[in-house]
């Protein structure tokens, strides 16, 4: 029997801390056109290349006038001519040459033939209704600070300063290695006893969503040399590696042992389920995240452990966002109830023995978030992790079965992690 006595079990927080403390990233900087820079991370401050506006500019749809004509009060406008004493001026347009003050068009009374003009309000001072040259920005002003995620609004701000490009952080390259003799790619017919490999779609999709470039490997069989070869190749090509499955206690689960041969295993087992056999390692300076299980569990364990690493690479906050919500109904009790006549404590061959853990164990339960009739944010337990994803917006880590008296009930306020 394989020796699993060296397994290192840690808490969720400790696992993340270990991964982050052993990740030393030095992202390259790329110059990209602003049209292609949305959602990228700005690597250097974006600065104005010119003064804006570059001349005295009108702030509103108006009529441009000479302040001198109003210095002593409302003037007699009899005989005023367009182009001499007044001229149309529109929002954001440079004031007509020689004019220095604007009156909102709503205060202007014009004849249909534009031959006569009068006003029902006078400007309060010289340059009223205008913006001075350079009042919006001066050449060299910082428009957007480094480290910001470039949104369409920020891109427009950068462009307004005469920029056409931005310096951004290179996207992290993240390799995904699916392992398992039982896995096959989707096909018309699936061989007996085989499962379709779907985590590539899940994990690579998350990598793209979080700003990375996925490198999807072919399925690697449960072969020690094949696993080591794939890991070493991935670590040479990528900034981060995700190794899926092969980390439990089956006879063909070699991933952690192989990681130990080619690198340093930081932990192997965490205090939650599903995903108990999640792992972390470093191989040739590259962090390797071990994700166990099919999509239902792999989805949130990827959020827990890959997301923080990618955010560190990109210089963004590494914590998952949390919100407080009211539990709309009780969580269903885990596990089957003993049948009448059975001894509840009698061990059965199909049951796993109780785990000996250093930390309190958490069962990860998915919840769907919605707003209750009273306006309070509510969390409703999802029936099954892999079938209820379309209705799930968040996840809840709640109290373990060993502390049932602390298990939250309907009406309690609970803290939930938002899906990354």
Image (cartoon, rainbow, N blue to C red):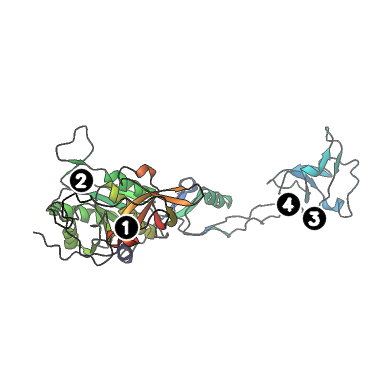
Q: Residue at x 16, y 48 (%)?
A: 221
Q: Position of residue 20 (x, y in %)?
A: 33, 64
Quote the CA–CA distance across marks 2 and 3: 74 Å
Q: Position of residue 147 (x, y in %)?
A: 46, 59
Q: Secondary structure at mark 3?
A: loop
Q: Which residue is mark 3?
A: 126
Q: Is residue 74 left or right of residue 268?
A: right
Label 1 packing within 10 angstroms: few (<14), some (14-19), many (20+): many
Q: Position of residue 412 (x, y in %)?
A: 42, 57
Q: In this rendering, which labeled residue sits more in front, label 2 or label 3?
A: 2
Residue nearest the viewer, comparing 357 with 307 = 357
Q: Residue at x 60, y 55 (%)?
A: 50
Q: Secondary structure at mark 2?
A: loop
Q: Earlier in the sequence, mark 2 or mark 1?
A: 2
Residue 130: mark? 4
Quote the CA–CA distance across marks 1 and 3: 61 Å
Q: Earlier in the sequence, mark 1 or mark 4?
A: 4
Q: Which residue is mark 2?
A: 219
Q: Is residue 222 left or right of residue 282?
A: left
Quarter holding residue 345: bottom left
Q: Position of residue 332 (x, y in %)?
A: 31, 50
Q: Which residue is mark 1?
A: 305
Q: Is residue 295 above or below residue 359?
A: above
User: Disc 2, disc 3: CB below 8 Å?
Assistant: no
Residue nearest the viewer, comparing 299 with 392 = 392
Quote the CA–CA distance across marks 2 and 1: 22 Å
Q: In this rendering, which labeled residue sits more in front, label 4 or label 2?
A: 2
Q: Residue at x 86, y 35 (%)?
A: 115
Quote the CA–CA distance across marks 4 and 3: 9 Å
Q: Earlier in the sequence, mark 2 or mark 3?
A: 3
Q: Earlier in the sequence, mark 4 or mark 2?
A: 4
């Amino acid at each position: 029997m394989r020796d699993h006595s060296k397994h290192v079990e840690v808490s969720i927080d400790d696992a993340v801390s270990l991964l982050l403390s052993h990740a030393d990233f030095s992202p390259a900087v790329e110059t990209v056109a602003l049209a292609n820079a949305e959602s990228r991370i700005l690597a250097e401050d974006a600065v104005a290349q010119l003064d804006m506006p570059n001349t005295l500019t009108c702030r509103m749809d108006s009529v441009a006038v000479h302040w001198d004509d109003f210095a002593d009060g409302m003037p007699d406008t009899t005989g005023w001519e367009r182009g001499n004493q007044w001229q149309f001026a529109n929002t954001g347009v440079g004031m007509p040459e020689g004019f220095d003050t604007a009156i909102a068009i709503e205060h202007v009374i014009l004849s249909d033939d534009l031959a006569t003009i009068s006003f029902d309000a006078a400007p309060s001072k010289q340059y009223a209704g205008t913006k001075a040259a350079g009042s919006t920005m001066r050449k060299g002003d910082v428009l957007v600070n480094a480290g910001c995620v470039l949104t369409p609004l920020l891109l427009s701000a950068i462009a307004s300063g005469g920029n056409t490009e931005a310096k951004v952080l290179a996207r992290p390259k993240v390799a995904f290695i699916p392992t398992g003799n039982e896995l096959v790619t989707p096909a018309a017919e699936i061989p007996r006893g085989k499962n379709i490999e779907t985590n590539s779609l899940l994990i690579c999709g998350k990598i793209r969503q979080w700003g990375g470039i996925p490198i999807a490997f072919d399925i690697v069989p449960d072969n020690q040399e094949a696993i080591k070869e794939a890991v070493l190749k991935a670590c040479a090509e990528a900034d981060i590696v995700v190794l899926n499955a092969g980390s439990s206690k089956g006879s063909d689960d070699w991933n952690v042992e192989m990681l130990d041969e080619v690198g340093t295993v930081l932990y192997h087992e965490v205090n939650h389920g599903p995903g108990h056999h999640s792992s972390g390692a470093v191989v040739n300076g590259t962090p390797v995240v071990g994700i166990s299980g099919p999509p239902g569990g792999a989805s949130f364990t990827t959020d827990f452990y890959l997301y923080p690493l990618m955010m560190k690479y990109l210089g963004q906050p590494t914590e998952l966002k949390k919100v407080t919500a009211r539990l709309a109904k009780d969580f269903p009790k885990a596990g089957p109830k003993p049948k009448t006549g059975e001894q509840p404590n009698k061990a059965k061959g199909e049951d796993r023995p109780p785990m000996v853990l250093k930390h309190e164990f958490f069962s990860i339960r998915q919840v769907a978030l919605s707003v209750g009739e009273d306006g309070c944010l509510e969390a409703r337990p999802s029936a099954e992790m892999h079938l209820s994803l379309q209705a799930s917006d968040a996840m809840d880590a709640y109290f373990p079965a060993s502390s049932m008296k602390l298990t939250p009930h309907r009406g309690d306020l609970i803290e939930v992690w938002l899906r990354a």
